């Protein structure tokens, strides 16, 4: 089982000062958040993606993924290609983060890249 799935953290959200609903504190993982359920992990992922749009000006899939998976930690261009392939959209696509289905599709694509398996919505 991947680290993200073990931690109920499908996006592999790093530890921060932000206290997430359902987050286990202190985390037993030295780098990533742990959540009490996968639902809480997805909730945090969805909220972060909305904040990327509202607070940080992310508009395109490429913008979101460049912030989510910066090049100093990831092969960001490959990550963008994988998310776009999964969503069947170009990197210039502007997902509507106020549309639940669109936001969930972006989160599911991120979870697939992070964990190597289709997203699990188990609670």
Image (spheres, grey):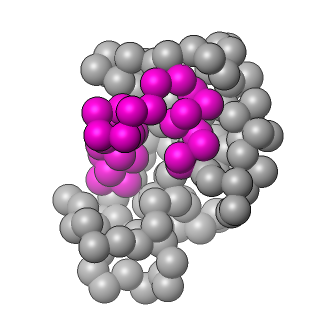
Position of the N terminus by quadrant: bottom right
Q: Position of residue 61 (x, y in %)?
A: 57, 27
Q: Residue at x 39, y 33 (%)?
A: 57
Q: Is residue 78 left or right of residue 55?
A: right
Q: Nearer the viewer, residue 63 or 85?
A: 63
**Is 96 part of what is drawn in magenta?**
no
Q: Is residue 51 above or below residue 59?
A: below
Q: Is residue 56 left or right of residue 68?
A: left
Residue 37 visible here: yes
Q: Is residue 106 left or right of residue 51?
A: right
Q: Nearer the viewer, residue 40 or 62?
A: 62
Q: Is the magenta region chiefly helix, strand or loop?
A: helix
Q: Is residue 31 above or below residue 71?
A: below
Q: Position of residue 112 (x, y in %)?
A: 64, 41
Q: Looking at the image, how many numbered discs can be counted on the residues?
A: 0
Q: Residue at x 44, y 32 (%)?
A: 58
Q: Residue furthest front?
A: 57
**Is 52 part of what is drawn in magenta?**
yes
Q: Residue at x 32, y 50 (%)?
A: 44
Residue 117 visible here: no
Q: Residue at x 68, y 15 (%)?
A: 90
Q: Position of residue 94 (x, y in %)?
A: 49, 16
Which of the 4 image quadrants contains residue 21? bottom left
Q: Position of residue 27 (x, y in %)?
A: 37, 81
Q: Is residue 61 left or right of residue 43?
A: right
Q: Is residue 122 above or below residue 53?
A: below
Magenta segment boundaries in residue numbering: 39-68
């Amino acid at each position: 089982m991947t680290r993200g799935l073990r931690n109920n953290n499908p996006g592999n959200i790093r530890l921060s000062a932000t206290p997430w609903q359902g987050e286990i504190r202190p985390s037993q993982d030295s780098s990533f958040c742990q959540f009490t359920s996968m639902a809480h992990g997805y909730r945090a992922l969805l909220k972060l993606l909305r904040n990327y749009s509202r607070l940080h000006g992310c508009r395109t899939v490429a913008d979101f993924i460049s912030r989510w998976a910066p090049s100093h930690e990831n092969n960001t261009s490959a990550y963008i290609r994988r998310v776009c392939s999964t969503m069947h959209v170009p990197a210039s696509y502007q997902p509507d983060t106020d549309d639940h289905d669109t936001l969930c599709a972006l989160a599911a694509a991120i979870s697939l890249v992070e964990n190597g398996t289709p997203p699990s919505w188990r609670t």
